[in-house]
Image (cartoon, rainbow, N blue to C red):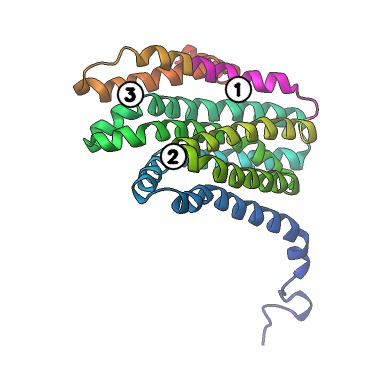
């Protein structure tokens, strides 16, 4: 009888494949567990420190404030394979260009959306709930947490770059350190300042984490890049979008026109972000010229 798999070529389980990737897998799994702890730590702590009504307001604000993070997942799924390919090819120059372009893409997608909803959170909550108590208690924490989500999105590109290099240890210890800081600050701040203090603590620590993660990627993984230029490429479009939203916020229309107005504000912020991101601006102008 014909043997489909000769004895010398029969498939067998190879433990060496698992041994070669186990350190990376454990690192990624540990980072994911810490990330899950970070996203839920504030709720766990606040549930014991706040009255039930105030805790309910915070959970609603947190749900709205972090909902826009759903748009960061497709960006991560898009840039991570590109980073991995370029790292495997040892194409450092193209990797640096792709990293900067990915930062700008994240800004153009997330920052206009988070700024628009953050500034107009009271109006959106009023139209959605028609409940003055919810608007009064939820709008400020929602705005702060939305800005926090926008900041958090800026860490997707350095995180993807670390994964592409298989470097998980530094990111794990950084995340563990911020988890400890968050726990400490929440215990100190929440009893005195409630939901506003918890939201502000989140945003403060995320800002600090961004300030650490970008130089971390630059120093270890992109040593030829200028860290000041990397920060300027982030800060200029964010500042211009924030400034334009602040100006437009004072010219609010009547409530019946609020939804189309919000769409116009978001589109304007997106265009500004694209124009102040060098890589996206070139592609945008090239597309207009060729159309």
Query: Which residue occupies the foreground of this view, 5 or 211?
Result: 211
Say which residue appears at 64% left-offset and 39% top-offset: 82
CB within 8 Å, label 1 to label 3 = no
**Separation of marks 1 and 2 at Cα, in angstroms:** 29 Å
Q: Is residue 226 magenta?
A: yes
20 to the left or right of 196: right
**Separation of marks 3 and 2 at Cα, in angstroms:** 29 Å
Find residue 113 and report its horizontal and vertical position in percent: 43, 28
In the rendered structure, which segment of residues is drawn in magenta? 223-241
Say which residue appears at 80% left-offset and 25% top-offset: 224
Quadrant of the image containing the N terminus: bottom right
Position of 187 relative to 248 (above/below):
below
Q: Earlier in the sequence, mark 1 or mark 3?
A: 1
Find residue 275 and report its horizontal and vertical position in percent: 52, 14
Q: Residues within 10 Å of mark 1 (few under 14, many from 20)?
A: many
Q: Which mark is drawn over residue 263?
A: 3
Residue situated furthest front in the rendering: 192
State which mark lies toward you, 1 or 2: 2
Q: Which mark is drawn over residue 234?
A: 1
**Separation of marks 1 and 3 at Cα, in angstroms:** 23 Å
State which mark lies toward you, 3 or 2: 2
Q: Earlier in the sequence, mark 3 or mark 2?
A: 2
62 to the left or right of 286: left
Judged by its main secondary structure, the magenta piece is helix
């Amino acid at each position: 009888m014909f043997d489909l798999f000769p004895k010398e070529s029969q498939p067998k389980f190879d433990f060496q494949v698992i041994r070669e990737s186990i350190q990376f897998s454990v690192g990624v799994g540990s980072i994911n567990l810490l990330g899950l702890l970070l996203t839920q730590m504030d709720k766990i702590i606040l549930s014991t420190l706040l009255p039930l009504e105030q805790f309910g307001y915070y959970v609603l604000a947190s749900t709205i404030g972090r909902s826009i993070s759903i748009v960061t997942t497709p960006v991560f799924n898009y840039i991570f394979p590109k980073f991995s390919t370029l790292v495997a090819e040892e194409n450092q120059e193209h990797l640096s260009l792709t990293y900067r372009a990915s930062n700008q893409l994240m800004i153009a997608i997330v920052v206009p959306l988070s700024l628009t909803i953050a500034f107009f959170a009271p109006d959106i909550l009023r139209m959605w709930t028609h409940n003055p108590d919810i608007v009064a208690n939820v709008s400020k924490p929602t705005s702060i947490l939305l800005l926090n989500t926008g900041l958090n999105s800026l860490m997707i590109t350095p995180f993807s770059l670390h994964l592409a290099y298989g470097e998980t240890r530094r990111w794990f210890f950084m995340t563990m350190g911020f988890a400890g800081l968050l726990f400490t600050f929440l215990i100190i701040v929440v009893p005195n300042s409630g939901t506003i203090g918890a939201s502000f603590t989140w945003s403060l620590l995320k800002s600090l984490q961004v300030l650490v993660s970008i130089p971390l990627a630059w120093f270890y993984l992109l040593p030829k890049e200028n860290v000041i230029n990397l920060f300027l490429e982030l800060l200029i479009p964010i500042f211009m979008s924030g400034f334009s939203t602040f100006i437009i916020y004072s010219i609010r229309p009547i409530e019946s026109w609020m939804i189309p107005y919000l769409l116009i504000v978001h589109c304007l912020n997106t265009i500004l972000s694209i124009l102040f991101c060098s890589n996206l601006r070139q592609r945008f102008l090239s597309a207009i010229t060729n159309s």
